């Protein structure tokens, strides 16, 4: 019997476990995937010439096992083992509505391969649903989250600069990474020609200057390698393996069980409370039950919905905590796909090191009120770097010594902007259990029925137009553009399937990430999100995890759960 | 490492003594796996590599072992249909040499190979995806190789610093390291 079970060891589960352990609870993490060791499980040691098949996964294997995962930029022959085989983990989508579910099943989850961009949601984001009536009102506001953002940023280490922007709150930052000379030119041009827009250095969960509590966990400063998605042996970016799990283990209160697939949460029909978790060993297929006083469900947005829906019982025929019928609904990702690149004039300078970060343009549309004809807004990630050898070699004809000579020299300044837009919550975008199909462990497969709505598509069009206008304003020549939206999911910011809200009739969780109907069940991954913002969401999941862990512990002390 | 060096030496030797005489079986034997390409194809691969990225003041594609790596990719990486497409793209270059110069590409003197490939490349790079993919593959293998990354270009596995503004002169070499192609190169 544990005090708490945390289902999932990724971004959210790692922080939840750490916080619960540090508050004195005996915590069990159950992780569906295999154990990974910080350092020895990584492939960041591979030099360019060590990459199997020059970095590419064999074509037949790719087609057979990675039909969906291959769409992700970070899938290559050095990272292959960090992504699920789609052939082993199938799901269905509605005809004509593709959804790209990108994931990895192993200790640490996607915290190993995440993009590491780290931004707070603002008061505007937490009040967005109330303002325009899409979705339901968040039961929390920025003030509820601010201290937890402070705490998590300090713990994980975030490089960035304070900018004083209400739509992208400042935080507790380590030294900012510098812009290239031509990024500075782009910043000056955009900020001069488009009052209200800002071009800032990206905020990322990398240790530019480790603090004593980072060093104590064995974490080291960023080496500027940009090999991050292979895992970082330096522990320079925050992941569960480098950071939250070691901190949790230091308390002596943590137990980790890997290879344990959460089948369902068990409840006591008399009290309605959760009593434990039923798991299936992924290798032996043995079934076991772990018991605890409280459960934190952090299986990632879609996985969390699956566990809840599969926790069906006579008392809860529609799944656990689902009296509202909102479990699995309101699935969101970010509106993602529109991208513009160009060539820009800049100084005769270069750069050294591979900055694992870029520039960021915070949202500037519909800040005070909706004055654009659509709702919500979008931001951009990007960068201005000198073009690398491979595009330089591929771009124009050339062979022999002339080709070598062209590729030998650093290329022109290349600017790239990629938009990330806020997707509106829509109850029709949902995941459900398949009526008949199961996976190899006998768990019902998921059906995902999700598509962009009209507002989402309009955001996509406007983010492309704006990006082009900003490049032109900075004197760049546009060389490529993509206006097509990627399928939802490929932003890898999926969220919303167990939303927070005031009313148990229309939401799954209350303002403490506590299930309305199961008082000792807390859900703190992306499932809890009532709206999506346009910022990378991991920091918000982590802050919610820490906040919920605090409240859960207080409720336990008070004897109310 | 000794085997790798021997393979490179053999390939370098092949370039010196005439590409048609390249000991394909010997190369494959030191690589530890059966060759996937026959002797004439290996000669063509080697001639293409040598012409595309020749030995200059730095090693060329043959010296760094690109032909054997291409052979390995055809054996271990390419799907059957893409293997056929890549080899067809090579054969097309050979056909061009026979039409223009009356000899297989591998049997032409270096200067003539350069003339043929320069014209072929100018005509086909933008319109022929199979050729563009083939060329990108050879380029990728060369610049990912240790000499390509560290002798021709510059590579630091652990830079340890981010210097956002450094001097750029006519002698500054580009940074190496794995990177995606400039445009998505997929032969269908």
Image (cartoon, coloured by chain):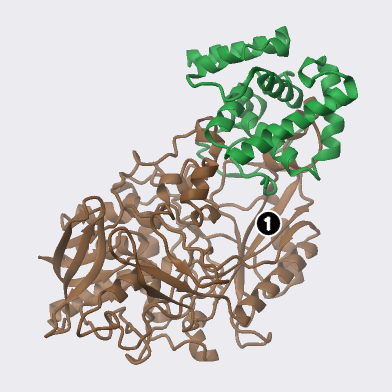
Mark 1 belongs to chain: A
Look at 16% across and 70% down and name the residue there: A276
Q: In which quarter of the image is the N terminus of chain A?
A: bottom left
| Vertical order, A407 against A234 (above or below) | above
Colour in which chain B is shown? green
Is A433 left, or right, of A115 in this rendering? left
Look at 64% across and 62% down and name the residue there: A418
Q: In the image shown, does A409 or B4 lie closer to the viewer?
A: B4
Q: Where is residue A274 in the image (x, y as percent from the top left)?
A: 18, 76
Look at 84% across and 28% down and name the residue there: B96
| Vertical order, B39 against A321 (above or below) | above
* Residue B109 lies in quadrant: top right
Q: Can residue A337 be seen in this view?
A: yes
* Residue A278 lies in quadrant: bottom left
Residue receiving disc 1 = A416
Q: Where is residue A460 in the image (x, y as percent from the top left)?
A: 65, 72
Q: Where is residue B117 in the image (x, y as percent from the top left)?
A: 82, 28
| Vertical order, B132 against A25 (above or below) | above
Q: In which quarter of the image is the C terminus of chain A?
A: bottom left
Is A382 left, or right, of B30 in this rendering? right
Q: Position of residue B154 (x, y in %)?
A: 62, 30
* Residue A445 lies in quadrant: bottom left
Q: In the image shown, does B154 or A34 lie closer to the viewer?
A: A34
Mark 1 Cα-neighbour bin, 10 Å: few <14, some 14–19, many ≥20: many
**According to the colouring, which chain is brown?**
A
């Amino acid at each position: 019997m544990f005090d708490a079970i945390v289902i999932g060891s990724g971004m959210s589960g790692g922080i939840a476990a750490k916080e619960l352990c540090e508050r004195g609870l005996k915590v069990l993490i159950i992780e569906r995937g295999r154990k990974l060791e910080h350092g020895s499980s990584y492939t960041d040691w591979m030099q360019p010439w060590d990459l199997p098949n020059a970095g590419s996964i064999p074509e037949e294997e790719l087609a057979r096992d990675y039909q969906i995962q291959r769409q992700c930029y970070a899938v290559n022959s050095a990272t292959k083992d960090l992504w699920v085989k789609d052939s082993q983990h199938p799901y269905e989508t509605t005809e004509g509505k593709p959804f790209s579910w990108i994931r990895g099943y192993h200790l640490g989850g996607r915290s190993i391969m995440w993009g590491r961009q780290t931004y707070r949601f603002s008061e505007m984001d937490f009040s967005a649903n109330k303002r325009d009536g899409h979705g339901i009102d968040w039961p929390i506001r920025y003030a509820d989250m601010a201290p937890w953002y402070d705490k998590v940023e300090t713990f994980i280490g975030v490089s960035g600069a304070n900018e004083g922007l209400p739509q992208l709150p400042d935080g507790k930052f380590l030294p900012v990474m510098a812009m290239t000379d031509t990024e500075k030119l782009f910043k000056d041009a955009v900020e001069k020609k488009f009052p209200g827009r800002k071009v800032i250095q990206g905020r990322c969960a990398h240790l530019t200057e480790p603090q004593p509590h980072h060093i104590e966990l064995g974490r080291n400063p960023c080496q500027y390698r940009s090999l991050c998605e292979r895992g970082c042996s330096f522990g320079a970016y925050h992941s569960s393996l480098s950071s939250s799990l070691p901190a949790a283990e230091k308390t002596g209160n943590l137990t980790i069980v890997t290879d344990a697939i959460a089948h369902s949460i068990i409840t006591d029909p008399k009290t309605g409370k959760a009593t434990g978790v039923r798991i299936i060993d992924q290798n032996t297929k043995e079934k076991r039950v772990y018991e605890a006083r409280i459960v934190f469900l952090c299986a990632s947005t879609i996985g969390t919905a699956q566990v809840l829906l599969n926790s069906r019982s006579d008392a809860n025929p529609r799944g656990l905590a689902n009296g509202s019928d909102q479990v699995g609904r309101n699935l969101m990702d970010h509106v993602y796909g529109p991208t513009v690149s160009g060539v820009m004039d800049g100084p005769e300078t270069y750069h050294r090191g591979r900055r694992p970060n870029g520039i960021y343009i915070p949202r500037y549309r519909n800040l005070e009120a909706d004055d654009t004809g659509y709702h919500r807004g979008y931001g951009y990630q990007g960068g201005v770097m000198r073009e690398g050898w491979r595009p330089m070699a591929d771009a124009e004809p050339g062979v022999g010594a002339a080709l070598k000579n062209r590729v030998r020299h650093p290329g022109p300044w290349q600017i790239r902007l990629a938009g990330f837009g806020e997707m509106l919550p829509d109850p029709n975008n949902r995941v459900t259990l398949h009526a008949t199909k199961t996976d190899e462990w006998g768990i019902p497969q998921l059906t995902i029925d999700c598509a962009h709505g009209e507002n989402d598509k309009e955001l996509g069009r406007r983010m492309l137009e704006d990006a082009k206008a900003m490049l032109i304003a900075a004197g760049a020549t546009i060389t490529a553009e993509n206006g097509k939206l990627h399928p939802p999911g490929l932003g890898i910011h999926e969220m919303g399937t167990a939303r927070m809200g005031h009313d148990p009739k229309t939401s799954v969780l209350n303002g403490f990430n506590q299930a309305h109907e199961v008082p000792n069940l807390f859900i703190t991954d992306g499932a809890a999100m009532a709206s999506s913002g346009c910022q990378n969401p991991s920091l918000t999941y982590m802050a919610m995890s820490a906040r919920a862990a605090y409240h859960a512990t207080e409720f336990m002390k008070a004897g109310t759960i | 490492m000794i085997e790798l060096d021997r393979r490179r030496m053999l390939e370098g030797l092949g370039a010196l003594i005439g590409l048609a005489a390249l000991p394909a079986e010997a190369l494959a034997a030191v690589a530890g796996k059966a060759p996937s390409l026959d002797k004439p194809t290996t000669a063509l691969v080697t001639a293409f590599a040598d012409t595309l990225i020749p030995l200059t003041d730095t090693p060329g594609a043959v010296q760094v072992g690109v032909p054997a790596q291409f052979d390995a990719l055809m054996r271990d990486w390419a799907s059957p249909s893409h293997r056929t497409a890549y080899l067809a793209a090579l054969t097309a270059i050979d056909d061009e040499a026979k039409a223009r110069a009356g000899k297989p590409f591998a049997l032409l003197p270096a200067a003539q190979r350069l003339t043929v490939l320069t014209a072929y490349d100018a005509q086909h790079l933008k319109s022929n995806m199979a050729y563009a993919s083939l060329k990108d593959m050879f380029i990728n293998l060369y610049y990912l190789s240790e000499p390509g990354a560290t002798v021709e270009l510059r590579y630091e596995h652990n830079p340890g610093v981010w210097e956002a503004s450094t001097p750029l002169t006519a002698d500054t070499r580009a940074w190496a390291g794995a990177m995606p192609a400039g445009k998505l190169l997929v032969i269908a």
